[in-house]
Amino acid sequence: MNDYIQVMKDLIKEHYSNTPEGNKVEMQTSDVLKWFRGVIPGEPINQHDVFDVLTEMEYKKSQKILTKQVQTKKGNKNLGIEPEFKDVEIGRILVWDLYDKLE
């Protein structure tokens, strides 16, 4: 049987860092699992494995605020007035902080 946990660790090390050296990529555990599913068969690993690997590798978690744009002022094309929009919070989730590796 393949050691999928080690494969997961190697893939994370190859593509991401747990220190802020590249672009920050925020992913939920289920998103990281989907990322792995591109190369690892789905049955041998699950979200618990992803959680254990990221925790063992000392990746940090943070809160991500989800927003949605809502129109706050109608526009008028005839008068040349553009509509105005504002980002409004619609929820919060916890995510893993991964950073792209610099090449």
Image (cartoon, helix red, strand yellow):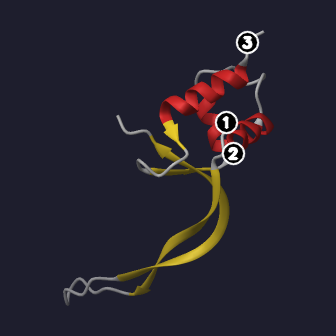
Residue sitting at x 78%, y 9%: 1
Q: Is residue 15 left or right of residue 46?
A: left
Instruction: Say whether disc 3 or disc 1 marks the residue closer to the N-terminus.
Output: 3
Please say if the residues under marks 1 and 2 sit with CB atoms less than 8 Å apart: yes
Q: Residue tagged by mark 1?
A: 33
Disc 2/disc 3 C-alpha distance (Å):
22 Å
Left or right: 98 in relation to 91: left
* Circle 2 residue: 29
Q: Which residue is mark 3?
A: 2
In the foreground, 100 or 92? 100
- Which mark is drawn over residue 90? none
Give the vertical position of 90 relative to 81 (above or below).
above
Q: Amino acid at mark 2?
A: Thr
Q: Amino acid at mark 3?
A: Asn
Q: CA distance from mark 1 to mark 2?
A: 6 Å
Of the numbered discs 2 and 3, the one sitting upstream in the chain is 3
- Amino acid type, callout 1: Leu
Q: Residue 91: x, y in percent?
A: 65, 70
